[in-house]
């Protein structure tokens, strides 16, 4: 049985080739740098992002965080918003139904002082560092 599997021919595109030839063809396609990269490649990659992390940096203002979460939950592009309690920096995980500019959405809120891309390489998803300000300072 093992011998018959090793000697089996595999179809690659429209021609019959041996398994080794098919592997060589796949490898050459993967490492072919003849393709031009354009903006659509990056846009398509952004389309597949399903979660975004928002790391809340001190000072922690729970009222401001809850207001931002409420705003995000109201967006039609957002499926779910979770608040993960951590001692040093709470994490808000935003699950997306479709692409949305979370940074722009949060910058429009008066309770958000600053938002920038996080440089924490240990994150499992694209993450922003978010600094909130007290609701007293913004008139709530």
Image (spheres, grey):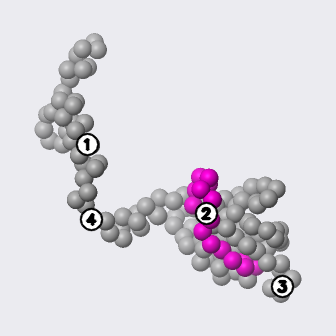
Closest to the camera, between mark 4 and mark 2, is 2
The residue to which callout 3 is attached is 137
- Looking at the picture, does residue 86 appear above or below residue 115? above
- What residue is at 86 percent from the left and 83 percent from the top? 136
First in residue order: circle 3 vs circle 1: 1
What secondary structure is found at the residue carrying circle 3? helix
Mark 3 Cα within 10 Å, few/some/many (few <14, many 20+)? few
Q: Could you say where residue 38 lies in the image, as x and y percent from the top left?
A: 32, 69
First in residue order: circle 2 vs circle 1: 1
The residue to which callout 4 is attached is 36
Q: CA distance from mark 3 to mark 1?
A: 59 Å
Q: Choose between 31 and 93: the one closer to the eye.
A: 31
The residue to which callout 2 is attached is 119
Q: Choose between 50 and 29: the one closer to the eye.
A: 29
Quadrant hosting residue 115: bottom right
First in residue order: circle 1 vs circle 4: 1
44 in the magenta segment: no
First in residue order: circle 2 vs circle 3: 2
- What residue is at 79 percent from the left and 68 percent from the top? 58
Q: CA distance from mark 2 to mark 3?
A: 28 Å
First in residue order: circle 4 vs circle 2: 4
Q: CA distance from mark 4 to mark 2?
A: 29 Å
Q: CA distance from mark 2 to mark 1?
A: 35 Å
The residue to which callout 1 is attached is 26
Quadrant of the frame with the N terminus:
top left
Q: CA distance from mark 3 to mark 4?
A: 50 Å
Q: Is residue 95 visible?
A: no
The magenta segment is 111-126
Residue 89 located left or right of residue 120: right
């Amino acid at each position: 049985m093992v011998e018959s599997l090793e000697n089996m021919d595999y179809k690659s595109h429209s021609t019959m080739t041996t398994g080794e030839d098919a592997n060589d063809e796949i490898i050459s396609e993967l490492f072919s740098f003849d393709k031009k990269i354009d903006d659509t490649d990056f846009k398509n990659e952004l389309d597949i992002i399903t979660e975004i992390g928002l790391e809340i940096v001190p000072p922690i203002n729970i009222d401001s965080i809850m207001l931002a979460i409420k705003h995000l939950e109201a967006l039609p592009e957002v499926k779910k918003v979770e608040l993960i309690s951590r001692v040093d920096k709470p994490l808000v995980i935003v699950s997306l139904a479709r692409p949305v500019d979370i940074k722009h959405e949060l910058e429009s809120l008066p309770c958000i002082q600053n938002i920038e891309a996080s440089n924490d390489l240990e994150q499992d998803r694209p993450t922003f560092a978010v600094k909130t300000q007290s609701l007293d300072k913004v008139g709530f």
